[in-house]
């Protein structure tokens, strides 16, 4: 093979690798979209549970530790939702880097 043929093969391999990375990024984005929806629903449920626990605590029907546990779960879920949201917002930038 000539130098030109080797260079063409190398560029084709590089192009295929970039196309695979773009495909992976799009798959990751679809996963993030569906997971974000589920995490948001879960956060809503966690928030409702926290409200219930606070109401029960005010009525002296539950322990303070249950309210604290519910608050901890809510904070953890908020962190997850925020992280997923960041992934969704940075998708276009990551895709742009691959296309550059």
Image (cartoon, grey):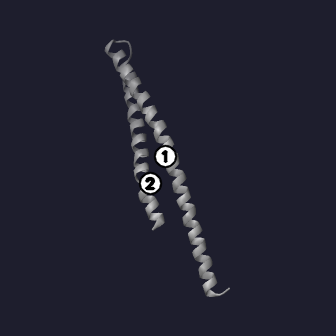
Residue 26 horizontal/vertical position (percent): 52, 54
Mark 1 or mark 2, earlier in chain: 1
Instruction: Give the left or right position of residue 22, taking residue 70 as reference.
Output: right
Cα distance between the residues tagged 1 and 2: 10 Å
Residues under numbered marks 1 and 2 in contact, where contact means CB atoms less than 8 Å apart: yes
**Taking the image as drawn, is residue 33 in sight?**
yes
Q: Residue at x 43, y 49 (%)?
A: 88
The residue most toward the bottom is 2
**Residue that mark 1 sits on:** 32
Q: Measured along the vertical axis of the image, is residue 85 above or below residue 18?
A: above
Could you tell me which secondary element the residue under label 1 belongs to?
A: helix
**Between 82 and 95, which is closer to the camera in this rendering?**
95
**Between 83 and 32, which is closer to the camera in this rendering?**
32
The residue most toward the right is 1
Q: Residue at x 43, y 36 (%)?
A: 40
Q: Quadrant of the C terminus?
A: bottom left
**Residue that mark 2 sits on:** 91
Q: Residue at x 49, y 50 (%)?
A: 29
Q: Measured along the vertical axis of the image, is residue 70 above or below residue 28?
A: above
Based on the displayed image, in which of its 4 quarters is residue 20 positioned?
A: bottom right
Q: Measured along the vertical axis of the image, is residue 99 above or below residue 50?
A: below
Classify 10 Å Cα crowding around label 2: few (below 14), some (14-19), many (20 and above).
Answer: some
């Amino acid at each position: 093979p000539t130098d030109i043929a080797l260079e063409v093969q190398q560029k084709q391999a590089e192009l295929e690798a970039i196309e695979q990375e773009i495909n992976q990024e799009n798959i990751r984005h679809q996963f993030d979209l569906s997971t974000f929806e589920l995490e948001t629903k879960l956060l809503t449920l966690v928030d409702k549970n926290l409200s219930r626990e606070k109401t029960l605590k005010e009525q002296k029907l539950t322990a303070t530790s249950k309210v604290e546990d519910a608050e901890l779960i809510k904070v953890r879920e908020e962190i997850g939702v925020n992280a997923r949201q960041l992934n969704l917002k940075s998708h276009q930038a990551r895709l742009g880097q691959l296309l550059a």
